[in-house]
Amino acid sequence: MNRTLVTMSRPGSDPQAGLTYATVTGRADPWYLFDASPNAPLRALRALRADSCLIEPDCGDTVLVCSGGPGTVPYILAVLARAVPSSAALVLPGDVALHTSEGALRVEAAQVDLSATRGVAMHAPEIVMDGVRGEMKFQRMDAAIQHLHAGLGAVSTVAQQITTTVGRLVQRARDSLRWTDNADETRAGRLRMQVDERLHVSARHATVLAEGQVKIDASKIDLG
């Protein structure tokens, strides 16, 4: 790698600033250690990362270092060549970083907010979401799912109206309690109830109508 030094003259008595190529050899936060050319007028072999250098330097990277006169702090202005081209870390002010590795992108931030005037779309063969608390608010939501498997601890639902169309419904519960304030109507082609122990029906008025046969079979029948 060519490490030709370029000097930039400044007006007045200010010392000249020198630019040189260097190779990062290590890091001691917040300092970066580097190996510069023997002819480079750099008194220190360490430098800070400038705010304009968004890509975080790593060992083996070739960087551009700017150094002034005595008493000035050298700064890494840019990463010129990556030792590992398939990965990088884009560090932004405010403790925000974007990490790339072999086509993968990872975002590190205290909070991520996506705002769009038209829409936000996600397309992937697999989408994973993990969190402690979630909240969704929609005026209208359409969902098409081929297969759904859900493990829920407690479910509380409040709705004005629910309409469900199901090809086949199978339910199993340890205990089932239901309250209906007004009317509860069931329409079925055939209805069969099987109770292992006791069936109790209590009503102010009860009517049983059948066009055909009504059959009551028991070892003992009490009427009245």
Image (spheres, rainbow, N blue to C red):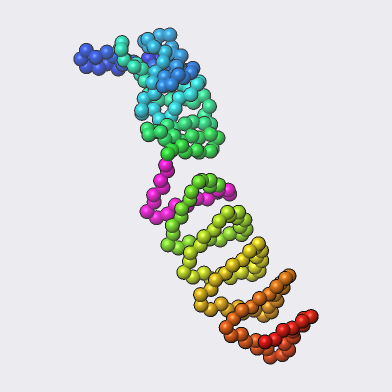
On the image, the x and y values in percent for residue 79 come to: 43, 25
In this view, the residue farthest toward the bottom is 211
Left or right: 167 as drawn, with respect to 49: right
Count of marks placed on residues: 0
Q: Can residue 169 be seen in this view?
A: yes
On the image, the x and y values in percent for residue 190 come to: 69, 79
Question: As rendered, which of 58 and 205 lies closer to the eye?
Answer: 205
Quadrant of the snapshot with the C terminus: bottom right
User: In the rendered image of this protein, does residue 90 appear above or below residue 201?
Assistant: above
In this view, the residue farthest toward the left is 12
On the image, the x and y values in percent for residue 48 come to: 38, 21
User: In the rendered image of this protein, does residue 63 appear above or below residue 93?
Assistant: above
In this view, the residue farthest toward the right is 219
| Span of residues in magenta | 111-127
Residue name at image x 40 percent, y 30 percent: 54
Residue 21's image quarter?
Answer: top left
On the image, the x and y values in percent for residue 141 come to: 48, 61
